Image (tube, helix red, strand yellow):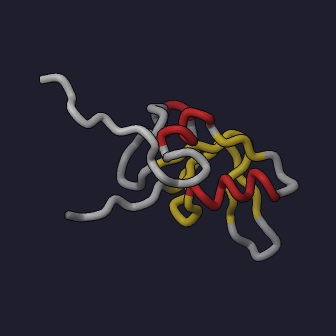
Amino acid sequence: MATKAPPATAASSTWTDEDGVRRPGADAHAWLPGTNQTLCGLSLHRTRLGRFPHVLWIDTLWLADTSAHRIVPCRRCVAAAGGRSGARRWMRVNPRP
């Protein structure tokens, strides 16, 4: 069974750190590379979110806590990605037919 890749980040703005690496800013969302929507269901194209495939979602949560730049993680994406611990909390075991 193949494991799913961890979510990357999509955000509404960008900033460059002192090493010259592009970082997400403002409203940040979790995004699975290869899809055109965030984990909370927003379309990347319609909402004009920039993709950051090199920045993992867990790194964005860390940047939101430690960075001087304003980064606001989407609360629905935090819940869909498993919270700040990184483990999924809820899973449907027996779906209806």
Reply above or below: 45 against 70.
above
Name the residue rendered at 41%, 38% in the picture: 90
Q: Quadrant of residue 94?
A: top left
> Closer to the camera, 94 or 43?
94
In this image, 39 relative to 65: left or right? left
Name the residue rendered at 44%, 47% in the picture: 88
Residue 42, given in percent of the width and then of the height, sits at 48, 32
In this image, 3 relative to 56: left or right? left
In this image, 3 relative to 69: left or right? left
Residue 59, given in percent of the width and then of the height, sits at 64, 61
- Outermost residue toward the right? 68
Residue 38 visible from this viewpoint: no
> Closer to the camera, 41 or 45?
41
> Closer to the camera, 82 or 73?
82
Residue 97 visible from this viewpoint: yes
> Closer to the camera, 82 or 18?
82
Name the residue rendered at 56%, 48% in the picture: 10
The total number of labels drawn is 0
- Outermost residue toward the left? 97
Residue 7, given in percent of the width and then of the height, sits at 47, 54
Name the residue rendered at 70%, 58% in the picture: 62
Residue 86, given in percent of the width and then of the height, sits at 53, 54
- Outermost residue toward the bottom? 19
Which quarter of the rendering shows the N terminus? bottom left
